Image (tube, rainbow, N blue to C red):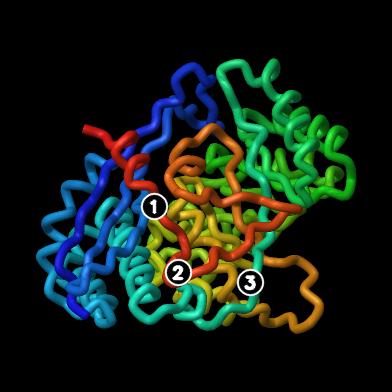
Amino acid sequence: MKITAIQFVALSAPLGAAKPYGMSKSLATGRASTVVKLTLEDGTIGHGEAWGQPAFNRGYEAFLANYLVGLDVFDIEHAYTRILARHYHFGVQGPMMACISGIDMAAKDAIGKVLGLPVCKLLGGQRLDSVPIYASGGYLTETPCEDYRDQIDLLAEGNYPAVKIKIGLSPESDEERVAIAREVLGNDVELLVDINSNYTYDVAMESMERLAPYRIGWMEEPLNPADFQGYGRLHKRARMPIATGEALYTVFDFKNLVDVGGVDVLQPDLSLCGGFWQGRKIAELAYANHLRLSPHVWGGAIGLAAGIHFIASMSTFPHSDNIPKPTLLEYDLGANPLRTELLKEPIVVKDGRIAVPQGPGLGIEVDEEALLRYAAA
């Protein structure tokens, strides 16, 4: 079944009247993504999602299509390997790999439709009918002190079993934000914190010491993603689990992190790490090193659907019937039309879980009118 076309659709969704929100390093005034449409010779269309600035991604459209159009879709992973081997000067940390990620999602979606199977069955078999989530909220804003408690109140109203909040302004601010979250959410909610790589080793250690009494489920991205040695040092003294990986590309980046003993929870983002192609390899790395994995998702609905299928296919090893900490999917609560409006049937959370979409491929139907509505020039 040959690939006849690959098209990138650039999307942009400004926040409009909504307040900018985000992380310790910057705030978002809108959301953007690149939808990949891959067409097969029988007319089957698969959809994927590529991370990053759409303008950069579109620059790779013709380059990658030159390698992939005309191939049997079932053989596509060999083409990715050829691209990386031939163009190693480009590196893997950047738009080319994000584009391959989106193409791979689309290819697996198309294969699933051809075979009449959900993507999770293609990845290793479907273990779950629904996946547990953690709710990402408690964002930083232009007026973080004034806006924060209302966000935590909304998280509490949602009755989410696990919640992640943004910290990273300073260790003192971290403790203030965590104390409020723990007070409002109670002791039964698993509380995760995200620094977005804003700290050096010493500042991260100070934050950990301050937060240790609050039973933190994990501290996410305390250090710059390139600081593998720093992660190794930090992990040796850590007062809580360390999670990271949303800014790492391919299994090779993750191997560097694992080799220094710097992490407890790997967090690949399927829209940039290499799609399901590299996501499976990263999951096997976690499997072989007895580490947890929790995919990062901060894009649109297609990437969210991919994360659902990824988790539904994952092994529970070394656990069996009793799983003390199930693999969690990130569910971002920030204003994002590309998550809520891109599908004809939006993905919804019920009782802290998301049902694995039914039907072949990713099991979703993209709303073409929404694509047109949010298409960037």
User: Is 146 on the left-hand or right-hand side of 126?
Assistant: right
Towards the viewer: 231 or 302: 302
Q: How many angstroms separate mark 1 from mark 2 (CA)? A: 23 Å
Q: Residue sitting at 17 percent across and 54 percent down?
A: 61
Quadrant housing residue 326: bottom right
Residue 70 position in % (x across, y down): 12, 74
Which comes sooner in the sequence, label 1 or label 2?
A: 2
Residue corresponding to mark 2: 279
Residue corresponding to mark 3: 291
Q: Establish if 207 lies above or below 61.
A: above
Which comes sooner in the sequence, label 3 or label 1?
A: 3
* Camera sees residue 251: no
Secondary structure, mark 2, is helix
Q: Amino acid at mark 2?
A: Gly
Quadrant housing residue 146: top right
* Residue 101, numbered label: none
Secondary structure, mark 1, is loop
Residue corresponding to mark 1: 366
